[in-house]
């Protein structure tokens, strides 16, 4: 049984908070990647001043620019705002990493969480400082490993359904 599509759990958010989140993410990407606003604008199909306006939450980003940014920067642009509605972006194609690398990514996160849970300050809980130390990179690496396994399993399921339909015909 699947979750209801109508009147399911809804998360509330404000448009201004969503614009601010997109702006913060865009500014962080620019800084982390050493880009200029002209570079950012080129990716978004917009001018440098328009890209800067998006980062400052001065104007609303059109869907076309958002999608171009999501494609270029994967979840780095979209996942912050998608998280406001309980969603996330994930690549459709499974990442080409070995099964042992997937396990290493997941176990690394498990190890970091275990350390945080077993400290003397907040035993049994991961406090905000510990979560900050764990960082997005470890969370994202583990998520990519899990997503790759999820996509592989979905592909197996689709192949089985196709085979069953072929037998039934």
Image (cartoon, rainbow, N blue to C red):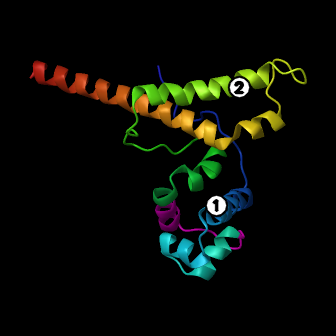
67 in the magenta segment: yes
The residue most toward the right is: 121
Q: Which residue does the numbered mark 1 point to in the structure image?
A: 32
Location of residue 168 (image quadrant): top left
Which tag, 1 or 2, sits closer to the chain's start?
1
Q: Position of residue 4 (x, y in %)?
A: 53, 29
Residues at marks 1 and 2 touching, judged by CB atoms closer than 8 Å: no
Q: Determine which residue is flagged by label 2.
A: 113
- Report x, y in % for residue 76: 58, 53
Depth check: give the residue in front, 52 or 164.
52
On screen, residue 166 versus residue 133, left or right, reads left
- For the record, the magenta segment spans 56-69
Q: CA distance from mark 1 to mark 2?
A: 25 Å
Q: Which image quarter holds the C terminus?
A: top left
User: Is 57 inside the magenta-drawn segment?
Assistant: yes
52 left or right of 43 in image: right
Instruction: Give the residue at x 55% y 38%.
Output: 141
Q: Is residue 86 visible?
A: no
Residue at position x 28%, y 28% from top? 158
Secondary structure of the residue carrying tag 2 is helix
Secondary structure under tag 1 reads helix
Counting the numbered discs, the total is: 2
């Amino acid at each position: 049984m699947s979750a209801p599509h109508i009147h399911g759990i809804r998360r509330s958010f404000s448009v201004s908070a969503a614009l601010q989140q997109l702006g913060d993410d865009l500014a962080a990407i620019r800084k982390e990647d050493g880009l200029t606003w002209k570079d950012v604008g080129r990716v978004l199909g917009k001018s440098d001043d328009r890209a800067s306006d998006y980062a400052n939450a001065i104007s609303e980003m059109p869907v076309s620019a958002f999608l171009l940014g999501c494609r270029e920067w994967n979840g780095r642009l979209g996942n912050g705002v998608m998280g406001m509605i309980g969603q996330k972006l994930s690549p459709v194609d499974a990442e080409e990493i070995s099964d042992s690398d997937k396990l290493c990514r997941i176990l690394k996160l498990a190890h970091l969480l275990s350390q945080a849970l077993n400290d003397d300050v907040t035993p049994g809980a991961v406090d905000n400082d510990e979560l900050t130390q764990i960082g997005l990179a470890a969370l994202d690496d583990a998520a990519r490993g899990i997503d790759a396994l999820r996509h592989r399993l979905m592909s197996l399921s689709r192949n089985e359904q196709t085979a069953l339909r072929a037998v039934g015909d």
